[in-house]
Amino acid sequence: MPEYLYTARLANGKIFQDAISAQNRQDALQYLLGKNYTIVDFREQNDNVLTQDIFAKWTKINDKTMLSFVKRFTFLIHSGIPVYKCVSILSEQVKDNKLKTSLNAILEQLNNGESLSEALQKHPKTFSTMFINMVKVGEQSGKIEQALSGMRNFMEKEIEFKAKLKSAMTYPTFMFFTSIAVMIVMFSFVFPRFIDIFDQIGMETPAATQIMINVSDFFSENFSKIVLAAAFAFFGIKAALSRPEVRLQYDRFKSKMPIMGPLIEKLMLVRVTRTLAILLKTGVPLIEALTITRDIADNKSVSAQMDYVIQGIKEGEKLSDALRRTDMFPPFIADTITIGEKGGILPSVLGDLANQFDVEVSEKAERISAMVEPIMIIFLGLMMVFIAMAVIVPMFNMAGSINHGSM
């Protein structure tokens, strides 16, 4: 009897790994789903790297591709086409290989009598936790079109938000990496040629030139070591951040950084309030909506705060009261949510808060961009002045010495 390895998430959010023996993959999956596990990874134990898609672990479906898929799905459902036929049509239309493969597998699972949400759960690397849960709620309430429409709205807002943030930060980022690249090229390849000329002449070098020579010698002699050290540092930091306790401290540190810290906090508030608003509007129960929001936050500090909120709700607290016990949400958020709870308009209030934070993030990102641009220009200007002093001044001295010697 074959054995299958799986990674699953429990209802409380805990993730664990285990193995199960079954007659076939279908029996194993049905058994696990019967325990209400959310399957994160599933494979036969004798699978190896030669039988797996070696790129699947790193590839990710483009946000716009997924948005196009959700839009088409919503349109087909709205037209009254059955789910199976919708998936069949979409599997023929999509061009992304990973999405096409998943849809073909889902077709087979639907044909075997599974619901759409059950089939989607077996493809967690293709479909997000939020998408899977919204489809599940849509099936249970008989409002799958509304669920898909809510997911479409969420993805449109996310893409628009990321585009605005990227636009505001592109120029400062480009300037920073360009200045670093220029310095590396100058000190590693350009300056050594000037240094050879100065050495041959044997002239006395000014202080700025001597600094340039020392830095250039260091880069030239240790270039491979610097690259190797940078690579080790990159992978070392990445490995350290894979540990939950380190990632928690890192995420907390990010929100406390000068300049960027407030922006990061606003980003988290946008993500949390918008996700909750759409989930609750679609009909997802509050605790389940908070759990999904926690899982997609991609920030251990936020996830820890959300755990406190979820625990408070389970103990009978209102959302506004549970939020007041955290240090992630400003007091006015809890006060605003209290109004939404009393008036029965919580999803609408959360949506308004998300829109407000969205505007604040855009404004703050633009201010940071406007502040960083002149700093980078000044830095590049100073660097050019130093280079001029280090190279041009000795060249004038050399020319003066030659003219004096010819007289």
Image (tube, rainbow, N blue to C red):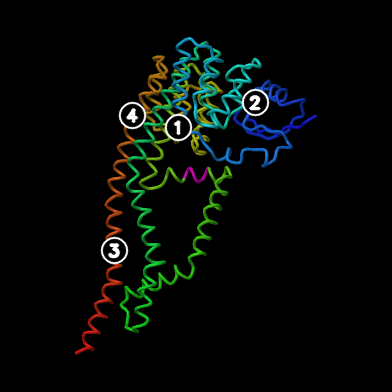
Residue behind mark 2:
37
Q: Determine the CA span between mark 1 and mark 4.
A: 23 Å
Asked if residue 188 lies in the magenta stretch, the reply is no
Mark closer to the observer (3, 2)? 3
Residue 313 at x, y = what percent?
Answer: 52, 23
Q: Residues within 10 Å of mark 3 (few under 14, many from 20)?
A: few
- Look at the numbered disc 2 and give the secondary structure of its residue: loop
Q: Are marks 3 and 2 in contact (CB under 8 Å)?
A: no
> Does residue 85 appear to the left or right of 268 in the view shown?
right
User: Distance from label 3 to label 2 (Cα)?
Assistant: 60 Å
In this view of the protein, which residue sits in the foreground, 252 or 131? 131
Q: What stretch is highlighted in magenta?
A: 248-252
Q: Are marks 2 and 4 in contact (CB under 8 Å)?
A: no
Element under label 3?
Answer: helix
- Whole-percent x, y for residue 213 in the image: 38, 73
User: Which residue was labeled with disc 1?
Assistant: 63
What residue lies at 38% left-to-right and 77% top-to-bottom? 196
Find disc 3 in the rendering and name its residue.
384
Q: Which amino acid does label 2 sit on?
A: Tyr
The tally of labels here is 4
Q: How far apart are marks 3 and 1 (CA)?
A: 41 Å
Q: Quick one: label 4 or label 3, which is nearer the N terminus?
A: 4
Mark 4 sits on what residue?
356
